[in-house]
Image (tube, rainbow, N blue to C red):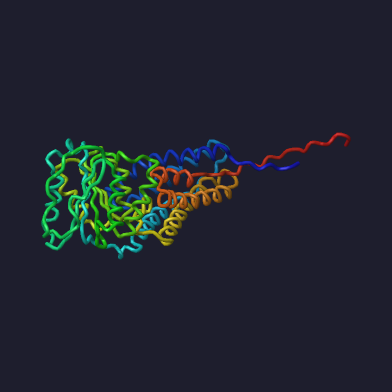
Amino acid sequence: MRSKSRFSIKMLSGSILAGFTYGLMGEWIYQNMERAVSPVISTVVYFTGMYLFVGCAVYAIGKLGHAHAYAPVNRRQWALALVLTLLLSALFAWIYDWIGSGSRGQASSYLFVIDHSDSMSRTDPDGMRYQAMETLLEDKEPEFAYGVYQFSDSAKMIRAMAPMREGGMGDEPVNTGGTAILHTLDTILQDLNNGRLQLEDHCRMILLSDGYATDMDETSRYDCMRRLEQYADRGISISTVGMTGDVDKQLMMLIADKTGGIYVSVQDIQQLEQGMRQAAQTEESDRNLLGYRSENDTGILFSAARILFLICLGLLLAVEKTVVCERFLNTNSVLISSAAGSALAGICLETGMNTFGLHPSAMRIALCILMSVTLLHEDTVWEIDDIPSGR
């Protein structure tokens, strides 16, 4: 006789499906909470939801495959892991935002980058965005410097960076053309490199637009990330203001998050002045354990901290799966596979978003799948070896 080891295909495929399903559900929850509450709360809700959903799914799959197992789940261990998930997700999110927060500074000058594409004739026909900009500068000292670019199919400097006392920007342009955001970022970088534009340290750039970039697609996201790194290296924080619901929210959030700015959504023209002021005067967005990290926060400390924190939270999910699967035979494989999946999940989220510029939604869904992967060791199967002929 000999033994044959095997793993439960039902558990493997079912846990992957559970992770993917929660990834979609969790993404909807996360996107609705991301800008409405603190990163601590959104992180706690996200991982608590994963703990409950995936744990229940693994238990149900195990029960279906091993209906003969009647031993009860250790509720004390399950509840303890849940409490630790709540506490540690809050603690890790707070620590991740707190690390290095003392280095954040207020804006020393403003560079306004204003959309005047054809769609602005409908979104802001009266030029309220320029009035909001002037109102924002009213409480500044005469020596406070600012500059203005306008962009559609191309970008143009209409006021060089200079103190307020040197006057305004002249006439407003006619709205026409597309929304070339990537080209605009390139143009400003070129002006910085050739000395045509000079910015102080901690200058805040405020980019306002009402639509999708006409010169970008998903394949251009990596190129955009590289441009944003150059801005962050120069200490330029870009806050973005999205007018109306047609704006490319994901792109505007990417630009803000990767440079240490904030994203502000303006649903109607009456909110514009308040939104512009919020974008200009808020010191910096909170660092988020599940989101993009500013290029100002590069370095091994932030990468290692994110990966370590996610591994720890994944291990708590692994403990839960082990507890609910104890009644379903050998669970060493459950713990080992879940721990390995958690390590891969942390590395995937960190490198995917902050090295390769992949979409954060896709990376969070991948995180859920990897953390949910479960290998359950099945019963040992005994077989009688074939007896050779002639014996």
The image quadrant of residue 365 is: top left
Q: How many labels does the image show?
A: 0
Q: Where is residue 148 in the image (x, y as percent from the top left)?
A: 19, 51
Q: Where is residue 332 in the image (x, y as percent from the top left)?
A: 58, 50
Q: Can residue 76 be seen in this view?
A: no
Residue 389, placed above or below residue 338: above
Say left or right for 324 vs 184: right
Position of the C terminus, as image quadrant, is top right
Position of the N terminus, as image quadrant, is top right
Pick the residue in front: 105 or 30.
105
Say left or right for 207 vs 310: left
Q: Where is residue 125 in the image (x, y as percent from the top left)?
A: 14, 38
Q: Can residue 373 be seen in this view?
A: yes
The furthest residue to the top: 389
Pick the residue in front: 22 or 101.
101
The furthest residue to the bottom: 102
The image quadrant of residue 376 is: top right
Q: Position of residue 324 (x, y in %)?
A: 51, 46
The residue lying at 39 percent from left, 39 percent from top is 24
